[in-house]
Image: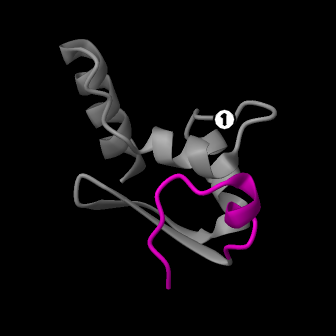
Amino acid sequence: MCVIHQPSGKVFSLFDDLLLLSEGEVTYFGPADRARAHFGRAGLSCPPFTNPGEHAVNAVAVDFESAATEEASRLRIAKLA
């Protein structure tokens, strides 16, 4: 078991299973190599040449830039949970 924030692409590729939590909720639990497809089905496709670990962390993070982005990110997290 390992707790890591924003792993490099190389480190992320070594993971077997992945558990992502946000706001106290499970947003993904399963094989790490299937996380990209999971987020894609939720409308959060990983852009080409993007570290899938970083993309997953960003997908489940609250964006505090403004009240609107915070609300949108909390709705996104609730949908994933």
Choose top left, top right, bottom left or bottom right for residue 70. Answer: top left
- Provide residue 73's location: percent of width, then percent of height: 33, 30
Inspect the magenta stretch and tell me whether residue 22 lies in it. no
| Farthest-out residue, left | 67
| Farthest-out residue, right | 49
Considering only vertical position in the picture, is 65 above or below 20? Answer: above
Considering only vertical position in the picture, is 68 above or below 40? Answer: above
Q: Which residues are magenta?
A: 1-15
Name which residue lies at 68% across and 78% down: 16
Which residue is identified by label 1? 45
| Farthest-out residue, bottom | 1
- Provide residue 78's location: percent of width, then percent of height: 30, 44
Describe residue 59's horizontal placement relative to residue 34 as left or right: left
Considering only vertical position in the picture, is 33 above or below 41? Answer: below
Considering the whole magenta stretch, tell me its main secondary structure.
Answer: loop
- Provide residue 46's location: percent of width, then percent of height: 68, 37
Name which residue lies at 50% across and 85% down: 1
Choose top left, top right, bottom left or bottom right for residue 18. Answer: bottom right
On the rendered image, what quadrant is the C terminus found in? bottom left
Describe residue 29's horizontal placement relative to residue 73 as left or right: right
Name the one closer to the observer, 76 or 16: 16
Tag 1: residue type? Answer: Ser
| Image color mode | one colour
Name which residue lies at 66% across and 67% down: 32
